[in-house]
Image (spheres, rainbow, N blue to C red):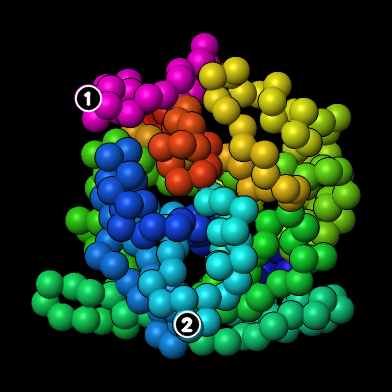
């Protein structure tokens, strides 16, 4: 199975935003330390990233609509929010080879670089990407990412967040039929990493989890105070992050004037109106408790 050999988990999540500087302000208020602005070379897109030790969240916006935007403009026609998942690989070429052996039609590997505007000068983080067809990763809009210069984007100061965020725990996608993608994700990650339940399908993606649910299931999981946008399916709805201490995170959010809901299980939820379109959950990191 390719998942046990080439794909190691989630590398990062992409959040499409209409106003990149406003998104930077919103996520700074949420308590995230963001990298300096990056600009994709040859493209009309730029980003800010909330970096964690092994993964990260990318805020992606258009800064030059006359250049290639990789369909970000089309995504933003229906709203902001989670628009894709980058899967991690140490060797993109090996991943591409294994996918091809399974008859999956991929695009790439291709190289991509971006400028990163540091105080001491501009550097160019580089990546090698393999794009997956929708049939290989239904509901996710996924691609595979290998970092060629990881030291440029994981500087120590960027890994410390005032809200205590440490890593991605899960991503929840709303789909018409959660069970329909089980076979495809078994091919990517291994059948033993896919669990099909009555109302949810889960995929172990390294240390994180991919969840696929129906809209009715999602409504049942969320408190009534969280407003759900009328988004077309499939829809990447929820990002759950682990924090060092949930009590400290709650205190930070209150102090920053961020409205949130905390349920009986201690899950902190911030609605999409404050996060650029996604439902953000923060939970106590079990690693922090050990």
Q: Alpha carbon of mark 2 to alpha carbon of mark 1: how far?
A: 41 Å
Q: Is residue 56 magenta?
A: no
Q: Point out the image quarter for the C terminus.
A: top left
Q: Residue at x 77, y 28 (%)?
A: 216
| 286 with respect to 208 (left or right) | left
Mark 1: secondary structure = helix
Please tell me which residue lies in front, 85 or 259.
259
Disc sitting over residue 65 in the figure = none
Q: Is residue 172 visible?
A: no
Q: Is residue 41 visible?
A: yes
Q: How many marks?
A: 2
Looking at the image, residue 137 lies above or below residue 177: below
Looking at the image, residue 13 lies above or below residue 241: below
| 68 with respect to 257 (left or right) | right
Quadrant for residue 107, please give it. bottom right
| 115 with respect to 224 (left or right) | left
Please tell me which residue lies in front, 112 or 18.
18
Label 1: which residue? 255
Label 2: which residue? 66
Percent across and percent down for residue 288 are: 37, 33
Boundaries of the magenta span = 245-268
């Amino acid at each position: 199975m390719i998942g046990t050999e080439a794909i190691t988990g989630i590398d990062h999540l992409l959040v499409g935003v209409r106003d990149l500087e406003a998104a930077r302000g919103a996520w700074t208020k949420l308590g995230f330390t963001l990298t300096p602005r990056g600009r994709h070379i040859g493209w009309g897109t730029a980003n800010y990233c909330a970096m964690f030790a092994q993964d990260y969240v990318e805020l992606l916006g258009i800064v030059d609509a006359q250049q290639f935007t990789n369909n970000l403009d089309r995504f933003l026609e229906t709203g902001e929010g989670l628009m894709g998942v980058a899967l991690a690989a140490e060797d993109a070429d090996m991943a591409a080879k294994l996918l091809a052996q399974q008859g999956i039609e991929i695009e790439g590997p291709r190289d991509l670089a971006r400028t990163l505007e540091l105080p001491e000068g501009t550097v160019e983080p580089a990546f090698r990407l393999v794009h997956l067809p929708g049939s290989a990763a239904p509901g996710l809009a996924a691609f595979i990412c290998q970092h060629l210069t990881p030291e440029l984007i994981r500087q120590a100061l960027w890994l410390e967040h005032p809200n205590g965020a440490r890593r991605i725990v899960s991503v929840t996608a709303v789909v018409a039929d959660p069970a329909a993608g089980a076979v495809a994700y078994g091919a990517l990650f291994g059948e033993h990493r896919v669990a099909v339940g009555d109302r949810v399908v889960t995929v172990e993606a390294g240390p994180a989890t991919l969840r696929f649910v129906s809209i009715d299931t999602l409504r049942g999981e969320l408190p009534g105070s969280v407003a759900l946008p009328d988004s077309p399916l499939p829809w990447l709805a929820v990002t759950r992050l682990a924090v060092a201490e949930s009590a400290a995170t709650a205190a930070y959010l209150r102090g920053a004037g961020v409205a949130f809901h905390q349920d009986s299980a201690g899950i902190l939820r911030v609605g999409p109106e404050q996060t650029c379109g996604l439902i953000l959950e923060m939970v106590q990191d079990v690693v922090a408790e050990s």
